[in-house]
Image (spheres, grey):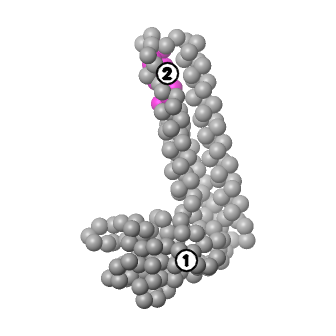
Amino acid sequence: MSDVDLNDIKRRMDGAINAFKSDIASLRTGRASANILDPVTVDAYGSRVPLSQVANITVPEARMLGVNIWDKSMVGAVDRAIRESNLGLNPIVDGQNLRIPLPELNEERRKSLVKVAHDYAEKAKVAIRHVRRDGMDGLKKAEKDGDIGQDESRAKSDKVQKMTDDTISDIDRLLAEKEREIMQV
């Protein structure tokens, strides 16, 4: 029996795409999105936790985020975490809530965000290539051990390569969409 499970390879490649989608969703575009605050972690109760575990994030207006903090004692920590998050955001404390106006992105910041998106895409492509290499190595080993024949090995290798090509083209398509979204004024 073959050591190489094509469904497992596909699942791992899909995982890389999902991680990439999550990464680019956190990039700020011209519109407000609660995902912008996904990378923010807060010092809470002796450990670092995601902002979403201590507050509710809303989008009341196109250029405004609202953060409703559940524990009043956490307001300062949440404010500090958002300011230090390198997202270029300056929250306004309003009792137990924070209002975060989203300034217009200037051309330099847009280009910087596109560069970050490209870095995320390259990281995802590397992960996909690692999955491909693992699959190809498994096929070579299975063929060498006599578990599968040369024809089956070649057919599965072609399938792995096609999955790789399709997944990388998906990454490129998602990157192009995000780039257009970021550069849109």
Mark 2 or 1, closer to the camera: 1
Label placed on residue 65: 1
Please name whichever residue, 58 or 74, is drawn nearer the observer in this view of the structure.
58
Amino acid type shown at disc 1: Leu
The residue to which callout 2 is attached is 139
Residues at marks 2 and 1 touching, judged by CB atoms closer than 8 Å: no
Q: Is residue 80 visible?
A: no
**What segment is highlighted magenta in the picture?**
134-144
Please name whichever residue, 149 or 125, is drawn nearer the observer in this view of the structure.
149
Say above or below: 165 vs 49: above
Under circle 2, the secondary element is helix
Say above or below: 43 vs 149: below
Q: Position of residue 21 (x, y in %)?
A: 56, 53
Please give the name of the residue rendered at 55% of the width and 12% of the height, measured from the top-left corner. 150
Amino acid type shown at disc 2: Leu
Q: Position of residue 178 (x, y in %)?
A: 65, 58
Under circle 1, the secondary element is strand
Q: Quadrant of residue 65?
A: bottom right
